[in-house]
Image: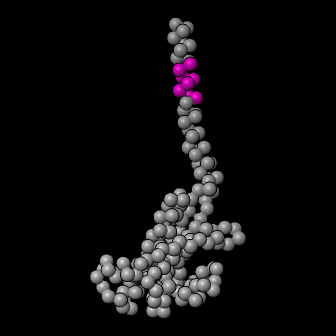
Amino acid sequence: MRRLLLVCAVGLAAIISGAIVFQSLPEANAQKNARLQWEYASVTHAYSFSPVKDKLNRIYGMAEICYVAQNGCRRSEIKYELDYGVFLQERAVEESTESRVAASRKAAQIAFQNALAQMGNEGWEIVSSPDLQFEFVNIDDYNKFDDKSVLFSSSDTKAVYFKRAK
C-alpha cells in the first residue's frame, strides 16, 4: 500500500511540475519575441534610362535597395541588361519609340523582380504591397551621382518594405 501511495505521489508531483513548466512556456516565448529585434530594408526605385534620348541596343533596368541603418540608408543597385534586338525579335515588332519604351519598362521590371528575389534569398520578409512605379532617368544625370535617390522626387516615391530578424 505504501508503494502504491508513493507511486501515486510521485506521479502527481510529475503532473503538477509538468503543468507548471507547460504554463511557463508561453511566457518564455512571449519574452523571447519581445526581445526579438528587426532590421529593415526597402526597394525604393525601379527605373531605366530615358528611351527617347538613349538609343542603345543594350537597355538597362535598375532597382535600388535601401538597407536601413542608424546613419541613413546603405544603398545597393540591382542591374539588368536587356538586348533590344532580341526584344524586338521575340515580339515581332519594329524599332520605334513605343517599342523602346516597352523594352525600357521591361528591363526595369526585371531588375525589380531580381531585387525582390535577392531580398527573399537573403531572408527578408516583404511587409508591404509591391506597387512600385517604373521610371526613366537621363543617363547623363545617372552618371553624375553615386546616390541615385537624388534623381527622383520623394513626393511620388512608392517603396516596397521588408524586415528580417537580426
Residue 93 in magenta?
no
Q: Is 158 left, or right, of 35 in this rendering?
A: left
Is residue 14 found inside the magenta-colored segment of the image?
yes
Quarter of the figure with residue 154: bottom right
The quarter of the picture where residue 102 lies is bottom left
Front residue (pair 156, 3): 156
Residue 143 horizontal/vertical position (percent): 60, 84
- At 32% from the left and 88% from the top, the residue drawn is 94
104 displayed left or right of 149:
left
Foreground of the two, 68 or 76: 76
Query: Which secondary structure is most common in the magenta stretch?
Result: helix
**Residue 95's x, y, as percent?**
35, 89
Q: Find the residue positioned furthest to the right.
A: 71
Residue 159 in view (yes/no): no
- Residue 54, given in percent of the width and then of the height, sits at 48, 89
Judge whether 87 appears above or below 20 on screen: below
The magenta stretch is 10-17
Q: Nearer the viewer, residue 9 or 144?
A: 144
Q: Is residue 143 above or below residue 26?
A: below
- Is residue 110 something that shows in the picture? yes
For residue 38, above or below residue 97: above
Q: Name the image quarter holding the C terminus.
A: bottom right
Q: Position of residue 113 (x, y in %)?
A: 45, 70
In this view, which residue lies farthest toward the left? 92
Q: Is residue 21 above or below residue 131?
A: above
Residue that appears at 60% across and 43% down? 28
Residue in view at x 55 percent, y 87 percent: 139
Q: Residue at x 52, y 84 (%)?
A: 156
